[in-house]
Image (cartoon, grey):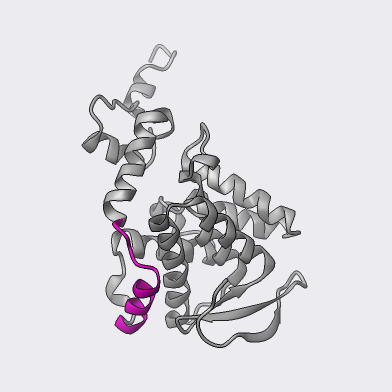
Amino acid sequence: MQAVGVIVADGRRHADGNIDHSVLIEGISVASSPLVSRAIEVSRAHMEPYLFNHVMRSWLFSASLARQRGIRYDEEVLAVSSVLHDIGLCPDFAGPLRFEVEGANFARDLATSFGIDSRRCQLIWDSIALNSTPSLCLHKETEVSLCCLGVGLDWGGWGFESIDAGVRDAILSRYPRLGMKQKFSQAMCTICETRGESTYDNFARDFGVRYVPGYAPSSSVDALMGSPFTE
């Protein structure tokens, strides 16, 4: 990872005994560990540039929000969750499940392979699988909520004014948006066109309804009324 600023080798020890270090990116302290480096490497190799920049901005925004609010959190969990939260959109990681779950499954397996304990792996899974469902995600553990806040800020601008303008501009300068709105919309439409069955209960269906001709997602009402019970 190419970091801007001074490497802070403070050797902080997690509750599980693992030691990692931090780096400064645009003045924001974030985790630096073999797992984080691998997550960045995978994302950079498989994501389109606009999407890679999005996940990096989301990470930095979430860390910046935590710093501003004085929130203590597991930096490594947040880093991996943020950087891999959209890996399920990449063709090499696509599958029959909704893309967030495909990505969460991959990230959990990756973290497990680095010896991360089951609780922290589950936090990574929840952060990714639920990142696009803030009505749930924001009420879970600190790392899960922070991931959602960072993603939401970069994706929909929620909390835009809460980030210092200088920090915001530095992040955007280092990781420009590169047509994020249109390219992300097209990615959602592609899912609706090719894997429509995975979109029935998530935000991807909104793009299908608005932009994809002939897209007809299943309805929860149909499920209830079509159930095999007599009443």
Say left or right for 3 vs 194. right
Q: Is residue 167 magenta?
A: yes
Residue 126 higher or lower than 23, as above or below: above
Q: Within the image, what quadrant is residue 31 found in?
A: bottom right
- Where does the image place residue 125, in percent across and percent down from the top left? 58, 52
- Where does the image place residue 135, in percent across and percent down from the top left? 39, 53
- Where does the image place residue 204, in percent across and percent down from the top left? 35, 41
Q: Within the image, what quadrant is residue 118 found in?
A: bottom right
Say left or right for 34 vs 105. right
Q: Residue at x 45, y 54 (%)?
A: 131
Say left or right for 113 vs 162. right
Q: Residue at x 57, y 71 (%)?
A: 1
- Where does the image place residue 182, in percent across and percent down from the top left? 27, 50
Q: Residue at x 73, y 59 (%)?
A: 114
Does residue 74 appear in the picture of this structure? no
- Find the magenta span and give its range: 165-179
Q: Residue at x 34, y 67 (%)?
A: 176
Residue 127 higher or lower than 175, as above or below: above
Does residue 182 appear in the picture of this structure? yes
| Quadrant position of the C terminus in the picture | top left
Please name the predominant secondary structure of the magenta segment in the image.
helix
